[in-house]
Amino acid sequence: MTVLVTGSRGRVATTLLGLLDAAGIKAKAASTHPEALSPPGGAETVRCDLTEPATFDAALAGVDSVFLYADATHAEAFADRARAAGVEHVVLLSSSSVLAPDAAENPIAASHLAAERALSAAAAAGAFEATHLQPGAFATNALQWAGALRAGKAPALPHPGTHSDPIHERDVAEAAFTVLTDPRLRGSSYLLTGPESLTSTEQLAIIAEVTGRPAPHTAVPPEEWKRSVAGFIPDAFADALLAYWAAHDGRPVPLTRTVEELTGHPARPFATWVADHAEAFHP
């Protein structure tokens, strides 16, 4: 069995490569910049740019399964080339946002949904089996506050009471490893959440407790927050984030036990994630 792992500079993919290596499973680490990769066990590195179909065939050569990031730019072309290469199974790192009623119009969810639909159509045509992992909020989203906290400043929150279900990237990687290596689990969609529904202020309180450093915040009007991020978040994405935060302000997120059902252990709490990344919040 050989697994192509796309996006191999990402946290989930990096962790997955380590799990595959520990299990003695051959992997190809793929990235737009393979020269920057140092995969465990000396795994083969290969260029695969999901926006450039010309890179697909070489990356897919000799591959049985794929761990795929949800870039919809050429998802149909990727599915076609995977079929031609004889790939048997594609595991897509999607998002729980695809389950929202307005997913097709939401700029954050739309790319994931389009990738899911392209793979599902290929699977329905008998090309390969497709499995969708749909995690909620990544715990790594808390790193957006790290710069301010390192500088002794208070992050600005437009909706301090908004809830999310922060999930550790290792839990996502372990779920991916399970569905890649157990044929009985292929062909389904798995909604992954962390074990807690936490507000932004609760997450900051946990960061303060674990790191021993202050983690204050300031509440700002949504319009002020949007202006502050205008240089690096497009308006459509900023509006989508604000709408999501407003919809979940004061409303806990429903949780699943899917991580435990797939991996055999409960999802790691947010405090564990903070402890694993505490250096990010220290000067």
Image (tube, rainbow, N blue to C red):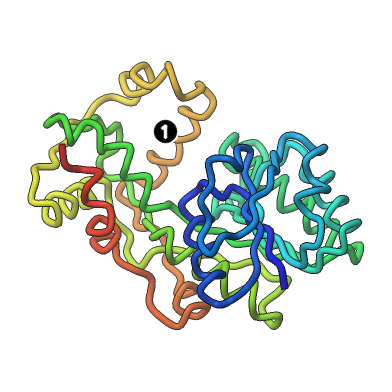
Q: Can the viewer see residue 92 in this picture?
A: no
Q: Nearer the viewer, residue 196 or 278?
A: 278
Q: Quadrant of residue 213?
A: top left
Where residue 135 appears, as percent x and y from the top left, is: 51, 58
Mark 1 neighbour class, 10 Å CA radius: few under 14, some 14 to 19, many 20 or more = some
108 or 99, which lies in front? 108
Does residue 10 show up? Answer: yes
Residue at image position (83%, 66%) is: 128
**Position of residue 175 measured from the top left corner of the image (x, y, whole percent):** 53, 70
Position of the C terminus, as image quadrant, is top left
**For the residue labelled by badge 1, is the local secondary structure a helix, a strand or a loop?**
helix
For the image, the number of numbered tags is 1
Image x and y of residue 1, in percent: 72, 73
User: What residue sits right under mark 1 in the picture?
Assistant: 242
- The amino acid sitting under disc 1 is Leu
Q: Residue at x 71, y 74 (%)?
A: 186
The answer to which of 61 and 129 lies nearer the viewer is 61
Task: Locate residue 215 relative to residue 51 in the image: left or right.
Answer: left
Q: Estimate the x, y position of residue 131 in percent, counting from the top left.
A: 69, 65
Residue at 82%, 63% (x, y): give it. Answer: 87
The quarter holding residue 2 reads bottom right
Residue found 71% across the figure and 53% down from its top: 116
* Observer-nearest of 163 and 20: 20
The residue lying furthest to the front in this view is: 42
